[in-house]
Image (cartoon, rainbow, N blue to C red):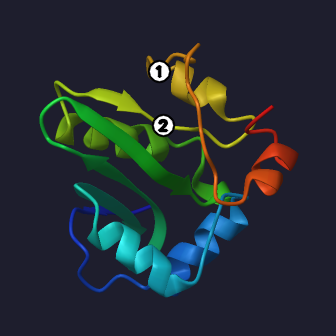
Amino acid sequence: MNLKFQYNLENIDWQRVADILKSVNMGYYDASIHKKAFENSYSVVFVFDEDTLIGFGRTISDGAYQGAIYDVAVLDEYQGNSIGKKIINKLIDDIKNCNIILYSAVGREGFYEKLNFRKMKTGMAMFSKADIMKEKGFTE
């Protein structure tokens, strides 16, 4: 592996972003939607093996005291190599001194717990596709 980290949107294949999210069983949309989401983010991280995109993540934040981490994904064949941890640590560093929230893919909560995230007792959500999110186990 020859990992390269990129912190901007230059030369990103947005269809590949959508394909990676789909492959790891996360929410995905048309490539143009992901492009817009990343463009409107506070910070971004993309990870390449040579020239092949293998993972990414992004934050949204007010830059003062609130932040959220979204769309952290690493191709299955690269998981277990601390790539996800490196993505999360960079994103945390980008919004240090902020409260940080995220929601995990079902079954991946343990990964975030190892990075000091804790389950919220008062977390609430209003999803645009509530029935699908309930079916996937995100809501009651």
> Label for residue 117?
1
Q: Nearer the viewer, mark 2 or mark 1?
A: 2
Query: How many numbered marks does the figure carry?
Result: 2
Q: CA distance from mark 2 to mark 1?
A: 9 Å
CB contact under 8 Å: marks 2 and 1: yes
Q: Name the residue: 29% across, 38% down.
A: 67
Q: Give the image quarter of residue 99.
A: top left
Say which amino acid is labelled 1: Phe
Say which residue appears at 35% left-offset and 82% top-offset: 12
As helix, strand or loop, the secondary structure at mark 1 comes to loop
Q: Residues within 10 Å of mark 1 (few under 14, many from 20)?
A: some
Marked residue nearer the N-terminal end (2 or 1): 2
At horizontal 34% and vertical 68% (from top left) the residue drawn is 38
- Residue 127 appears in view: yes
Q: Position of residue 138 (x, y in %)?
A: 73, 39
Q: Is residue 62 left or right of residue 127?
A: left
Dot label at residue 102: 2
Q: Secondary structure at mark 2?
A: loop
Who's the residue at 69% across and 59% down the image?
Answer: 24
- In the figure, is residue 139 to the left or right of 58? right
- The answer to whether 49 is drawn above or below residue 132 in the figure is below
